[in-house]
Amino acid sequence: QAATCIKFAKVGAVVAKSFARIFFRNAINTGLALIQSPEAAEAIENGETVRIDFEKGELTCKAGV
């Protein structure tokens, strides 16, 4: 149910080092975008707003692209 709560909180995507299988499946089922990237997760500050361009495959944060 965590994925549903995140989606209803109007979060556009979640970036993390990894995801538990059940969270991953629930997020996909609710339409919540997930990005699994240890490098991106380390570069992004907690609570920071980032720009994600899925077509280009780019994530932009304070640390860069």
Image (cartoon, rainbow, N blue to C red):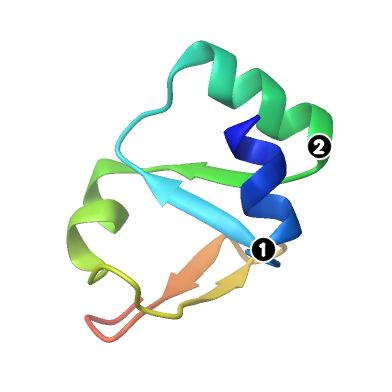
- For label 2, count other residues whose C-alpha is less than 10 Å away and answer few (under 14), some (14-19) or many (20+): some
| Amino acid type, callout 1 | Ala
Pointers 1 and 2 in contact (C-beta within 8 Å): no
Q: Position of residue 43 (x, y in %)?
A: 20, 65
- For label 1, count other residues whose C-alpha is less than 10 Å away and answer few (under 14), some (14-19) or many (20+): few
Task: Note whether 12 is above or below 48 in the view shown.
Answer: above
Residue hosting label 1: 9
Quadrant where the C terminus sits is bottom left
Q: Using the image, tell me which numbered label, if any, was put on residue 30.
A: 2
* Residue found 71% across the figure and 53% down from its top: 7
Quadrant where the N terminus sits is top right
* Residue placed most toward the observer, 50 or 29: 29
Q: Position of residue 37 (x, y in %)?
A: 35, 43
* Residue found 67% across the figure and 19% down from its top: 25
Residue 17, image quadrant:
top left
Q: Nearer the viewer, mark 1 or mark 2?
A: 1
